């Protein structure tokens, strides 16, 4: 074990050498500080992009392109932080500046060289958020005639924005993603309207099947600026999430248009603006923002397969996103096609309501027990214990972001091996029931499956036991067709049904671009989500970052935002800073713009 002073000295020497090389504009010297297998992940600070470069040559190429523009400098150990060493790896929290901003990050050294470096832009100089010492006064002391109150100012903004004044940004989709980004842009003074088709903020959650709860624990799910209270449940029921989002929208003063659906959107390249036609509660409104953000959700575009005989089926067919719950189906026969999160949740709720339930498993599914995931998978960063040990949400997000996607699976595999061993009896029970399990193509489990394809897993909160006990019947195979009374599988098995729930997942987010803008723009942007890992449903080549998420795309002024609550919280900052910089006329030369290898 190295002494703290030795560790500190080594970090300081590396940072001094890095600063000297950067100051001299010497990309070669800076890249020589990186190990042969090394990774610099930059979140907007140096690249004006979400970009991971690999090895000294990747670092050299990036710095050669960006040094003269973004001028990263003044790398230092973060105030109040002491670098640590564990197993030959030194970890240090760092801060730095660029020509236009300030940032922080995390650096890991191995054998005297930089192994991983995370740099993340935190704020733009001269355009900092009004918080802390810069917080607004609220009360205007002194006297003035005809001055408006805070409420009057908000009311006039609500009547003018989108009518007499145009927003700089329009966000389509007012779920947690649109709301988190709306809050960030509000704090940065970027005039923004969030459009959503529902009656109230949070209805995206309220309208789902009644047993739905968040499967991620509370510490992972905070929104920007306002943390959930300390007495909030670990797994939040959907209606409670809805109420929180509604409250948040109000207190964060987000310009949120309910009952508003986009009819069409077109980009005028000469003017650099969008024309967005909106049906706002029956009134047609035309918005002309500079930027358009699609925050329509990872689970926004239902994937509804067509099978022969659907129209002759006498019962009801629903996509899982439209299934309201089990109440109408007591004593009835229900077939649920699919075996991921929604399918399991819906089966369990139907069983509780005394329906006769059969799950059709079409392909293998990764299952991990919720308790085990919390302890083994998330505990170090997102838990009550983590909070007690001084781990803030912001730090946890940065630690998670600092592991390059290229090697993340290597850190995940041992965790899932541990889970497999810990819950061996549980998995044996599932296999005995005929359930086909998998652990991801390379045994790396849930997070990698989520990042690569956004599907193919269930976080078990009880439904698996119903399958083990035979309470929910399990059939494996492919749906071939429907007839009047049910579903016929490819092996000829007939399943009688009053209701068939198609828990068949969702399509790529660029499907929304096709619907709202054009197929041409959707194809120009290409597939959204995934890493290019060349695993199931995530075709290569390797991308190194999530395709098209939170960063510039091949379609000028079109952005995608979404993911789970953790990603909505963390990555909304970087998207907001990119939009703010453009609004203020700050140069944003993008390094390594997303290339398109797949259309959907």
Image (cartoon, helix red, strand yellow):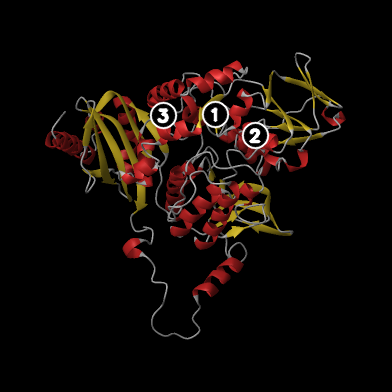
Is 13 rendered above or below residue 578? Answer: above
Q: Nearer the viewer, mark 2 or mark 1?
A: 2
Residue 453 marker: 1
366 or 454: nearer the viewer: 366
Question: Residue 545 in the image: x percent, y percent?
Answer: 45, 32
- Do labels 1 and 3 touch, CB within 8 Å? no
CA–CA distance in space, label 2 to label 1: 25 Å
| Residue at (38% x, 44% y) in the render | 384
- Which of the two discs, 2 and 3, labels the residue nearer the N terminus? 2
Number of residues whose C-alpha sits closer than 10 Å to that of mark 2, classed few (under 14), some (14–19) or many (20 or more): many
User: Which x, y percent locates residue 328?
Assistant: 77, 42
Q: Residue at x 63, y 24 (%)?
A: 469
- Image height check: is 68 above or below 132? above
Query: Which residue carries the number 2 mark?
Result: 348
Badge 3 marks a residue whose secondary structure is helix
Tell me: 119 left or right of 328: left
Q: Which residue has dot 3 on it?
A: 405
The answer to whether 426 appears left or right of 127 in the picture is: right
Front: mark 2 or 3: 2
């Amino acid at each position: 074990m190295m002494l703290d002073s030795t560790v500190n000295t080594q970090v300081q020497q590396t940072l001094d050498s890095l600063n000297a090389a950067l100051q001299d504009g010497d990309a070669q010297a800076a890249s020589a500080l990186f190990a042969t297998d090394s990774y610099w992940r930059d979140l907007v600070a140096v690249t004006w992009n979400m970009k991971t470069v690999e090895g000294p040559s990747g670092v050299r190429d990036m710095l050669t392109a960006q040094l003269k523009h973004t001028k990263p400098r003044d790398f230092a150990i973060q105030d109040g932080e002491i670098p640590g060493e564990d197993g030959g790896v030194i970890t240090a929290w760092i801060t730095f500046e660029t020509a236009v901003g300030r940032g922080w990050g995390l650096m890991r050294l191995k054998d005297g060289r930089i192994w991983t470096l995370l740099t993340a832009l935190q704020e733009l100089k001269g355009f900092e958020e009004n918080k802390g010492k810069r917080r607004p006064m609220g009360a205007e002391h002194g006297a003035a005639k005809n001055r408006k109150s805070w409420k009057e100012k908000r009311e006039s903004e609500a009547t003018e924005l989108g009518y007499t004044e145009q927003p700089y940004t329009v966000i389509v989709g007012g779920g947690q993603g649109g709301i988190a980004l709306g809050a960030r842009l509000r704090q940065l003074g970027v005039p923004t309207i969030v459009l959503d088709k529902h009656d109230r903020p949070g209805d995206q959650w309220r309208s789902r099947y009644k047993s739905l709860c968040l499967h991620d624990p509370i510490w992972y799910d905070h929104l920007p600026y306002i943390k959930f209270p300390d007495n909030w449940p670990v797994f939040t029921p959907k209606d409670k999430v809805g109420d929180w989002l509604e409250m948040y929208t109000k207190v964060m003063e987000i310009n949120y248009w309910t009952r508003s659906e986009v009819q069409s959107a077109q980009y005028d390249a000469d003017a650099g603006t969008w024309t967005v036609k909106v049906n706002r509660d029956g009134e047609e409104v035309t918005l002309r923002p500079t930027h358009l953000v699609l925050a329509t959700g990872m689970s926004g575009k239902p994937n509804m397969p067509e099978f022969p005989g659907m129209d002759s089926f006498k019962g009801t067919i629903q996509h899982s996103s439209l299934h309201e719950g089990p109440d109408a189906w007591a004593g009835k026969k229900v077939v649920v096609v699919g075996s991921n999160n929604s399918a399991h949740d819906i089966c369990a709720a139907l069983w509780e309501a005394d329906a006769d339930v059969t799950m059709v498993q079409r392909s293998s599914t990764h299952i991990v027990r919720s308790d085990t995931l919390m302890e083994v998978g998330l505990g170090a960063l997102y838990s009550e214990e983590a909070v007690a040990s001084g781990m803030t949400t912001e730090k946890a997000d940065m630690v998670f972001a600092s592991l390059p996607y290229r090697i993340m699976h290597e850190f995940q595999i041992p965790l899932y091996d541990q889970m497999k061993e810990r819950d061996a009896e549980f998995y044996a029970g599932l296999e005995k029931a005929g359930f086909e399990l998998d652990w991801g193509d390379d045994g790396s489990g849930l997070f990698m499956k989520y990042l690569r394809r956004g599907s193919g897993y269930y976080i078990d909160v009880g439904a698996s036991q119903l399958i083990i006990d035979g309470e929910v019947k399990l059939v494996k195979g492919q749906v071939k067709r429907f007839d009047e009374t049910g579903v016929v599988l490819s092996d000829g098995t007939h399943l009688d049904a009053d209701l068939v729930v198609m828990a068949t997942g969702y399509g790529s987010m660029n499907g929304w671009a096709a619907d709202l803008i054009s197929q041409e723009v959707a194809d120009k942007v290409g597939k959204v989500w995934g890493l290019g890992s060349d695993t199931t449903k995530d075709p290569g080549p390797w991308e190194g970052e999530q395709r098209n998420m939170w960063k510039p795309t091949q379609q000028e002024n079109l952005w995608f935002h979404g993911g789970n609550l953790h990603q909505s919280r963390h990555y909304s900052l970087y998207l907001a800073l990119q939009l703010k910089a453009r609004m203020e006329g700050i140069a944003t030369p993008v390094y390594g713009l997303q290339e398109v290898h797949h259309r959907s």
